[in-house]
Image (spheres, rainbow, N blue to C red):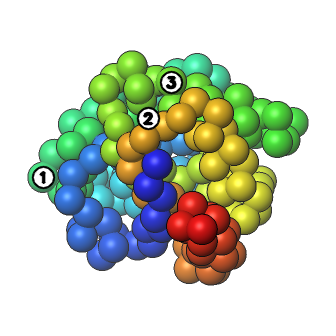
């Protein structure tokens, strides 16, 4: 598995060459934040309109596949409803990660960008989110490419883990 970091800025996203965008959001998260908010902005409020019309709620287990149009450099957008943010903990995070990866795999998506569940709302720290993500990925032997989306300070926290992982695999 190849993991790299992707800034939570549209200018960084414009440099992406394919792959899918996996967007996670909670049912009680309004307005959409983080990667979901940026995608909504770039799509001229399309995601917010889906929420407002009741076609997208953020209910746990909800998934929606969308075309990115010409405004995002990804091949597709997969939306994932996480349910309520109440009671969010590491066990919930792990369950969400397994589910995201399973749905992406069944959809034939092997390369993607994702902001880990709970990062946009600050329910889990950047470093811990990446540690748990990598643990779950190691369990299923995932071999694709993942771009973890986070803000600048989150990327700084995550970079150390990725450097350590790279050294461990090289040595």
What is the x, y in percent for residue 45? Answer: 34, 50
- Along the line of sight, the residue nearer the viewer: 162 or 13: 162
Badge 3 element: helix
Residue 78 vertical position relative to residue 33 in the rendered view, above or below? above
Return the residue found at the far front: 171
**N-term mark: 2 or 1:** 1
Query: Alpha-carbon neighbours of circle 1 within 10 Å: few (<14), some, or many (≥20)?
Result: few
- Along the line of sight, the residue nearer the viewer: 166 or 12: 166
Determine the image quadrant of residue 87.
top right
Badge 1 element: loop
- Residue at 65%, 71% in the rendered image: 164
What is the x, y in percent for residue 120? Answer: 62, 57
Q: Nearer the viewer, mark 3 or mark 1?
A: 3
The circle on residue 79 is 2
In three-dimensional space, the C-alpha distance between marks 2 and 3, rounded to whole angstroms, equals 14 Å
Badge 2 element: strand
The circle on residue 40 is none
**N-term mark: 3 or 1:** 1
Q: Is residue 123 left or right of residue 10?
A: right
Q: Is residue 3 visible?
A: yes
The residue indicated by pointer 1 is 70
Q: Nearer the viewer, mark 2 or mark 3?
A: 3
- Residue at 46%, 64% in the rendered image: 4
């Amino acid at each position: 598995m190849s993991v790299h970091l992707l800034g939570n800025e549209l200018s960084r996203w414009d440099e992406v060459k394919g792959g899918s965008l996996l967007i996670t959001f909670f049912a009680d998260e309004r307005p959409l934040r983080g990667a979901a908010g940026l995608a909504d902005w770039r799509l001229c409020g399309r995601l917010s309109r889906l929420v407002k019309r009741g076609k997208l709620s953020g209910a746990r287990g909800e998934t929606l596949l969308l075309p990115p149009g010409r405004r995002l450099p990804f091949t597709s957008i997969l939306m994932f409803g996480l349910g309520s943010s109440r009671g969010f903990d590491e066990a919930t995070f792990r369950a969400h990660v397994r589910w995201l990866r399973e749905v992406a795999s069944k959809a034939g998506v092997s390369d993607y960008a994702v902001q880990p569940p709970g990062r946009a709302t600050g329910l889990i720290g950047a470093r811990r989110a990446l540690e748990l993500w990598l643990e779950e990925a190691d369990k299923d032997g995932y071999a694709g490419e993942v771009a973890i989306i986070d803000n600048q300070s989150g990327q700084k926290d995550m970079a150390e883990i990725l450097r350590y992982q790279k050294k461990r695999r090289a040595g």
